[in-house]
Amino acid sequence: MINYSTYFFISDVHLGLGLKEEEKEKEAKLVKLINYAAENCDELFILGDLFDYWFEYKRVIQKGYYKTLAALIEFAESGKKIHYFIGNHDFLHRNFFREEIGAILYEDPAAFTLNDKKFFIGHGDGLVPNDTGYRILKWILRNKVLQRIYSTIHPDLGIKIASGTSKTSRSYTSQKDYGRKDGLIETAMRKIDQGYDYVIFGHTHIRSEFEYNNGKYINLGSWLEQPCYGKFTDSFQIINW
């Protein structure tokens, strides 16, 4: 009998989006899930937008979320991997997650072989062929020179501006049609044609599963409507939390 590993996936939690009590409840659910994952999976994949905005200065990280950060540290210290795909809201990471938590950070989608199946995994932003405006915005936001210039702003003001940018980005995303017209499914189909068994994205906030040829496209949706996680051992499941 083959002894397969178990992998968990989460996406688009958007910590910090709502009112204080709402966020407290959401973070409690997230911490509970991370602790559960530590006992029930081998690796954790975070597919972006864990935070509604994240701007990490050289010597400053933003206030709050310490329970989430502590849970992730405990998960990593147990010897298990955390794969963190940077999204369009939590785009500015320096070295905190890599050096203090031990997470592996990805700025772009990546390929994996999990239990003999080929996966193409990413947040999903910037992959829509006709979304030129967003790809330009992404280039600006990810530009290292511009990030260094922005980091000279006092953290209180800088995080306030980042929060406003996050709201603008979310409004833009919510108005887009990311079905066949806008290409996320087409992107997944192309990857399946290239030999991938599973293509996993977030970003659109629309939970979906789409079978094509011998592969499957899965979008984990978001925690704004229904907290959930993906689980893969010998097949992929989306499980409400």
Image (cartoon, rainbow, N blue to C red):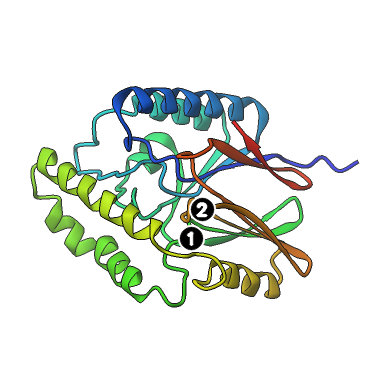
Number of disc labels: 2
Residue drawn where x is 61% and y is 67% of the image: 188
Instruction: Indicate left or right for 211 with 10 as reference.
Output: right
How many C-alpha atoms fall within 10 Å of the one at disc 1: few (<14), some, or many (≥20)?
Answer: many
- Report the quarter where the N terminus lies: top right
To which quarter of the image does residue 232 belong?
Answer: top right
Report, in whole angstroms, how far the alpha carbon at label 1 lies from the one at label 2: 6 Å
Q: How far across and how far down the image is residue 127, in percent?
A: 47, 69
Residue 202: image tag: 2
Q: Is residue 158 left or right of residue 133?
A: left
Q: Quadrant of residue 133?
A: bottom left
Query: Can you identify the residue that label 1 sits on?
Result: 124
Picture layout, residue 134 above or below residue 228 = below
- x and y, in percent, of residue 93 in the image: 31, 48
Q: Residue at x 42, y 67 (%)?
A: 126
**Image side of residue 199 versus residue 142, left or right:** right
Disc 2 is placed on an element classified as loop
Between 150 and 98, the one lying in front of the other is 150
Q: Given the image, on which type of amino acid does mark 1 rest? A: Gly
* Vertical position of residue 218 compared to residue 132: above or below: above
Contact (Cβ within 8 Å) of mark 1 with mark 2: yes
Q: Residue at x 39, y 73 (%)?
A: 131
